[in-house]
Amino acid sequence: MNHVLILPILLPLLTGAGQLLFYRAPFALQRLLGFASTAWLVLLGIWAVTAAGAGDYLIYQAGDWPAPFGIVLVLDRLAAIMLSLTAVLGLCCLLYASGGTDRRGAHFHALFQFQLAGLNGAFLTGDLFNLFVFFEILLIASYALLLHGGGRARSRAGLHYVIINLAGSALFLIALGTLYGLAGTLNMADLALRIAAAPAEDAPLLAAASLILLVVFGIKAAILPLLFWLPRAYSAASAPVAALFAIMTKVGIYAILRVFLLVFALGETPVNAVAWNWLWPLALLTLALGGIGVLGSDSLRTLTAYLVILSVGTLLATISLITPAALGAALFYLIHSTLMAAIFFLLADLLGRQREEGYDRFSAVGPIGHRGVLGSLFFIAGIAMAGLPPFSGFVSKVWILQASATEPGGLWLWGILLASTLLVIIAISRTGSSWFWRPGAATTPYPLSRGLLTLVCSMVGLNALLAMLGDPVMDYLALTAEQLLAPHGYIAAVLPEALASGQEVIP
């Protein structure tokens, strides 16, 4: 069954390649292949969550070459959660794109599959160099998807997006070269052992490499001061692309969790201590800036982009506490915030279609047509996004506040998180007033796609289901947090022969 691990990467990769080779095939066939591939990824995500639930690590060695010499894929609870979340989000975005967005440019479905392949590879890889490779795959696909449909705003945002990520890729290679020069390996499990046993004179270079990686992952996650590319890029992208990009920042957060709780976590003086010292204040500042940006946004898409930044700050501040309770709560919030960001990007598009110019700016004349249906949907989604009961945002924030209550600096997180939540409530209330309850006659209604409306309603229902299943989901996430904080299990699964020969895992 371990050979199934390659399918989340291989399936979208082959599907995308086939869609490129046969791009002259009927467009309906292109869509069918994309839907079939993504639906299979959903099933593989369910399998992954079930298979990893027992606590065992599933290992796939490409070409039967053992680690650390060969390419290795590793499935644990965290990777399984990210795989399933990506697949569900990808299927929803692909269904929404079938409403006509996918026809606005060439090769949308192939690029979409390559994006999924890069995301899944990043979550499964057990090697830092292959993490770089999969980063490049998903980034190249995202460059083209961002520009899909054309337009001056997308071209300008795409240029900034490409430049900042190319700089991040260069820094990534510098960090990898430094680590390989010091340790002679880039396999994460092997690297963890070698860094733990490294001589004291290598400590400054190892700390420098860890901080460079923190900058690289911080660019992907959009943490202050590396976040200013995100609002313009996300607000310029088409709705289903922006909704898929909601998982992109979580790739950076995943990388921080994986690398800094595994590679740099061992030894009497763990290298990751330097990174944690920087991460905590930067995360709080990111959270505060996200709240201010939400309040100052002039359109619903820009507001949603700043909500993504706010969620990044919340996640990284909670992760910085490095306790099982905090990590479990952060993972629950990760699922909630990713799903809600995608919903709001799609909802912004639905609302924008009710205006002749298609804009979602608050300054446009309103209110809009179909405000009974769309207003009710926006009200429910707004409650969920703001973190009010009974939705999963409220549940996750309560757990975050409980986990941080007794921790040093927890009062800072309490104050900034509650203040930013108040700003979100104000901003969403202002948005609803602008779109639905402004005095005056509503504009002439434009056609409202029942299929797209049903899809967004179903996604809101998924958020409600997440809240109803809060206890069993949190039980799974608590075990995931414990697994992350016990890297010796990962290392023992990947390198059983090294440990059998007497190489010690230093806690």
Image (spheres, helix red, strand yellow):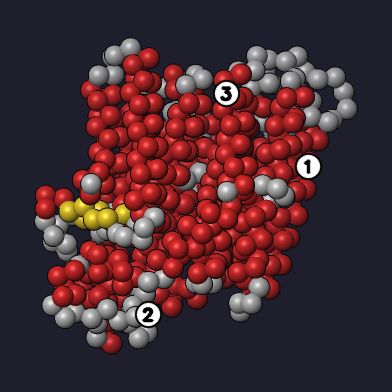
Instruction: Look at 35% across and 44% down and name the residue there.
Output: 47
**Residue 165 on image: x %, y %:** 39, 50
Residue found farthest to the top: 26
Asked whether 45 or 335 is in front, the reply is 45
Badge 2 amino acid = Pro
State which tag comes first along the sequence, 1 or 2.
2
Asked whether 166 or 445 is in front, the reply is 445
Residue 452 shows which numbered tag? Answer: 3
Judged left or right of residue 186, residue 440 is right
For label 3, count other residues whose C-alpha is less than 10 Å away and answer few (under 14), some (14-19) or many (20+).
some
As drawn, 450 above or below 152: above
Label 1 to label 2, Cα distance in Å? Answer: 46 Å
Residue 270 shows which numbered tag? Answer: 2
Q: Which residue is mark 1?
A: 429
State which tag comes first along the sequence, 1 or 3.
1
Badge 1 amino acid = Ser
